[in-house]
Image (spheres, rainbow, N blue to C red):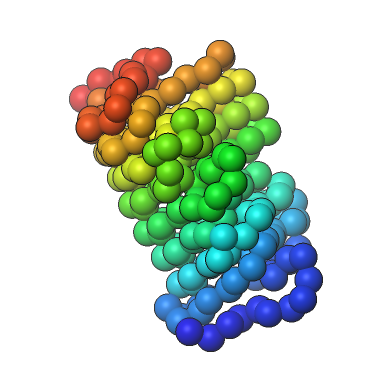
Amino acid sequence: HRDLHSFPTRRSSDLTQPVTIDGGGMGRITGDFAVYVNGLFANVTIRNLTLNGGFASTYGIVIDSASPVTISNVQVSGYPTGLQAGGGVTVIDSTIQANTSAALNYGVEVTGGNTILIRNSTISANSVVKANSAGVHVISGGTATLDGVLVTNSGIGIRNESGGTTLLRNSTIMGNTTGLSNFGSGTIVSFVNNAIYNNGTNGAPTSSVFQK
């Protein structure tokens, strides 16, 4: 692997304008805040990269009020939170794992009215023993759409709260302590063609939509 960024700074890659980071399948970024996108209209593509925090103390990828951002063929591991999505984010063909000794681990976290589309990917908090850790955590009006996604090996597969919304299509939620968990005013909508099984407690969506 080649190390794309090794600056002795708080953020390995701080992006504020349109750019594409393409590791060509060989790119590797390490350390806290491996990629930080901070630009309201930043059109950013991140692809063909491996991000490894080595049990870092913060985030792998942070999208701070940026849209559109596309993450494709990216492997993220070794962070308390693999991806924090603020803005409009699309994740395709990627694996995002949160796996550290932190009290809470989130594979993907969506907050503050922001949106994320995750397609054909695997998400994990990599800890079934931390009851409140989640593969996907949607809060404060955030919206996550999962299409063809495996969410596994987490305290909670999908955790919604405080007005968060999750839409499930063609996805599998399995191998978690709790599959689906909805706190307060959150919403989990299943388009029926999902598999939610083999969790300690499977849980249930708040509503189901039968597609013709």
Quadrant of residue 56 within the rendered picture: bottom right
Residue 10 position, x and y percent, is 77, 65
Q: Nearer the viewer, residue 91 or 177?
A: 177
Residue 91 position, x and y percent, is 47, 53
Residue 16 position, x and y percent, is 76, 63
Left-right relation of 53 to 150: right
Q: Nearer the viewer, residue 212 or 89?
A: 89
- Which residue is at 41% across, 59% downward? 94
In the picture shown, does residue 202 fall above or below 60?
above
Left-right relation of 198 to 17: left
Question: Disc count in the image?
Answer: 0
- Say which quadrant the C terminus sits in: top left
Q: Is residue 205 visible?
A: yes
Q: Is residue 81 visible?
A: no
In the picture shown, does residue 8 fall above or below 139?
below
The furthest residue to the bottom? 2
In the picture shown, does residue 156 fall above or below 1?
above
- Which residue is at 50% across, 51% downward? 98
Quadrant of residue 170 within the rendered picture: top left
Q: Nearer the viewer, residue 12 or 94?
A: 12
Q: Nearer the viewer, residue 75 or 177?
A: 177
- Which residue is at 74% across, 56% downward? 38
- Which residue is at 42% across, 48% downward? 126
